[in-house]
Amino acid sequence: MRKFLHRLKSKKGFSGPWVVVVAMIGVMLFVVISQYIRLMTIAAGVKDAVQSAVISASVSNWANVYPCIREGYAGGYKYTKGAWNKRMTSGNIYGRLSNLLGLKYSGGKYVSTTDDGVEYAVYGLSVHIDNSPFAPGNTNGIQEFQATSKITLEVPLSFGGDILPPMKVDLLVKSKYMPKF
């Protein structure tokens, strides 16, 4: 260790290679930090768009849910032909996402492209709508009308070529219907 420190303090021209090494480490650190920020920005933007699409789908169910809550029954049910039937829809979340993010369908995935290629892809959307129970006897802790969706986001890294695998994240978004009145 002493030899190393002595060489660093030496004035015999040993610092030239160290300047290059420190500069390369600085550049690599900058690339890693900027890539991390890029990935987190894309993930946050896609999650916000998925949340907006799921909330939009939940809001589109208001006509199915509101009359039942107003009458004191439960969530999305309708009385037809002498029986109560569930009445709800998950909407077109992929269509809303395509409009919000400018996605195109390609190879089983919805992708966002740039001049350089694929920026990110989303796929594997699953939507689960939980209807509140019909006319519960005990209203403490009952399940509310809510939509839960899960989608996979895949973002290829912009450096390292094909050596490094793309980032894959499952985004989970929940939306509840809560009457205001």
Image (cartoon, grey):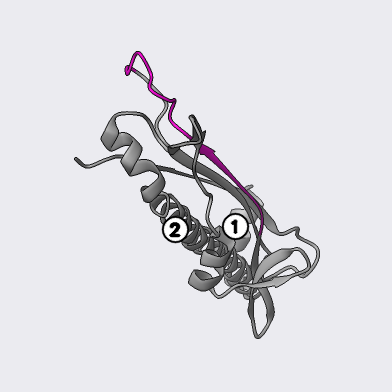
Report the residue at 55% width, 75% height from top: 102
Q: In which quarter of the image is residue 139?
A: top left
| Three-letter code, disc 2 | Asp
Q: Which of marks 1 and 2 is in front?
A: 2
Compared across the picture, whether 132 is left or right of 156 comes to left
**The label number, if any, that marks residue 55 in the structure image:** none
Residue at the far bottom in the pictured view: 115
Residue 151 placed where, x, y %?
Answer: 61, 51
**The label number, if any, that marks residue 6 in the structure image:** 1
Query: Which of the two labelled residues, at mark 1 and mark 2, occupies the earlier sequence position?
Result: 1
Q: Does the magenta stretch include residue 31?
A: no
Residue 51 appears in view = yes
Where disc 1 sits, the SS reads helix
Mark 1 is surrounded, within 10 Å at the Cα level, by few (under 14), some (14 to 19) or many (20 or more) other residues, namely: few
Mark 2 is surrounded, within 10 Å at the Cα level, by few (under 14), some (14 to 19) or many (20 or more) other residues, namely: few
Residue 71 placed where, x, y %?
Answer: 28, 33
- Residue closest to the eye, 73 or 101: 73
- Residue closest to the eye, 105 or 158: 105
| Three-letter code, disc 1 | His
Residue at the far front in the pictured view: 81
Q: Does the magenta stretch include residue 139?
A: yes
The part of the chain drawn in magenta is: 123-140
Q: Do the residues labelled 1 and 2 touch (CB within 8 Å)?
A: no
Task: Answer above or below: position of 55 versus 86.
Answer: below
Residue 177 appears in view = no
Question: What quarter of the picture does the C terminus occupy?
Answer: top left
Residue 179 placed where, x, y %?
Answer: 27, 40
Total numbered circles:
2
**The label number, if any, that marks residue 48 in the structure image:** 2
Q: How far apart are marks 1 and 2 (CA)?
A: 55 Å
Residue 28 placed where, x, y %?
Answer: 62, 67
